[in-house]
């Protein structure tokens, strides 16, 4: 089959990546979607069982840090576009192991950039290197009504955000130095189906289900902007096709929540959907020592994306959290498999690893 584009999506078996892969495979049958994932703990091919047999989908197990392997993949599949999501992404893990974050997020990104530079040719009419990043590179905000914009100076505080900031700089440098056609987006906290349960929302849903403590950092006063993952995938689609080369777009959910208020909404929703009396799980809240260098507040201004490209979130947080909690309760087997490591058996069976 002749495809109009051969798009490499890195980290496509992960949380956000699997939603992007699903959207592109289903929406663009004339695109060949090559899903590259190392399948570390957060990469799970069971996230994509509904599209794994589609004729325009190919999975490749590889490490973005292995430059020669990446070069071979670019050549074999004639990669002409990249949507780069593969990353180590959990702040707590970065505090314990900053080296791995630098290796994957910085050197892995550099490996992909170098392959594109070597194999793509100017004027790059049909090429795009789209790098997905985080709002954490901007640092922290006070409770003063200000927002992160695309012009906010970088001020990362954790090893995770420092590694992402560095990768962002490399992506832009490859445009400024070599003319590579790049786009960067910085997104707020994502939530929704298929998220690995080390992150707050699925962790708390699972802990409530098992009547385990709900660990809250400090007093729970840190504020985050929340973005439904399906809306993020929609934004990536719009920006990939319509965004300006060498530009940056912030993607946020237009809603901020204090952690403790968010947790109470999760508890209320899970209790109701499990048929518990209201307030049943409130006693599970357990305050723990604050995270080292814990940023106080993140809030993204997505008006540029809204005004220039017409994207906005499809739902508000209360509706999104209802859908999310319902999905995890309806897919308890997925959650149990992920938390027990059984999902790795799926890969072995499917791909004889």
Image: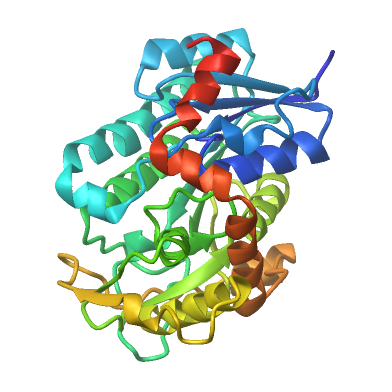
**Foreground pick, 179 / 146:** 146
Please give left or right for residue 41 compared with residue 129 in the image: left
Give the residue drawn at x 52%, y 81%: 268
Can the viewer see residue 120? Answer: no
Position in image of residue 8 (x %, y %): 59, 27
Position in image of residue 161 (x %, y %): 29, 54
In this rendering, the answer to whether 75 lies above or below 51 is: above
Please give left or right for residue 295 compared with residue 178 in the image: left
Give the residue drawn at x 68%, y 32%: 49
- Which quarter of the rendering shows the N terminus? top right
**Foreground pick, 297 / 278:** 278
Image-quadrant location for residue 58 = top right
Position in image of residue 160 (x %, y %): 28, 50
Can the viewer see residue 283? Answer: yes
- Given the current orientation, which residue lies at the most extreme front position? 276
Give the residue drawn at x 46%, y 26%: 344
């Amino acid at each position: 089959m002749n495809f109009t584009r051969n798009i490499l999506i890195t980290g496509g078996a992960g949380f956000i990546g699997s939603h992007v892969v699903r959207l592109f495979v289903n929406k663009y049958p004339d695109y060949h979607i090559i899903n590259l994932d190392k399948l570390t703990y957060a990469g799970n091919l069971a996230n994509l069982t509904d599209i794994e047999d589609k004729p325009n989908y190919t999975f490749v197990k590889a490490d973005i840090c292995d430059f020669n392997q990446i070069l071979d993949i670019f050549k074999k599949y004639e990669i002409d576009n990249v949507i780069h999501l593969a990353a180590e992404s959990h702040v707590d893990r970065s505090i314990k192991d900053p080296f791995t974050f630098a290796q994957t997020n910085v050197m892995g990104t550099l490996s992909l950039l170098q392959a594109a530079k070597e194999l793509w040719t100017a004027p790059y009419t049909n090429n795009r290197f789209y790098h997905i990043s985080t709002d954490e590179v901007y640092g922290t905000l006070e409770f003063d009504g200000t927002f992160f914009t695309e012009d906010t100076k970088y001020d990362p505080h954790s090893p995770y955000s420092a590694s992402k900031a560095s990768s962002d700089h490399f992506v832009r440098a490859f445009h400024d130095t070599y003319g590579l056609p790049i786009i960067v987006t910085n997104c707020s906290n994502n939530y929704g189906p298929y998220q690995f349960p080390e992150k707050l929302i699925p962790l708390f849903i699972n802990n409530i289900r098992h009547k385990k403590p709900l660990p809250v950092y400090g007093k729970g006063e840190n504020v985050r902007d929340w973005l439904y993952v399906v809306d993020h995938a929609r934004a990536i689609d719009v920006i990939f096709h319509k965004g300006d080369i060498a530009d940056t777009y912030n993607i946020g959910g237009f809603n901020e929540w204090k952690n403790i208020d968010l947790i109470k909404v999760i508890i209320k929703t899970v209790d109701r959907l499990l048929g518990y009396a209201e307030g049943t799980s409130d006693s599970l809240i357990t305050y723990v020592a604050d995270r080292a260098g814990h940023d106080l507040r993140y809030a993204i201004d997505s008006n540029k994306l809204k005004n220039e490209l017409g994207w906005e979130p499809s739902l508000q947080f209360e509706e999104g959290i209802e859908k999310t909690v319902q999905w995890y309760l309806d897919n308890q087997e997925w959650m149990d498999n992920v938390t027990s490591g059984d999902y790795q058996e799926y890969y072995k069976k499917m791909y004889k690893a």
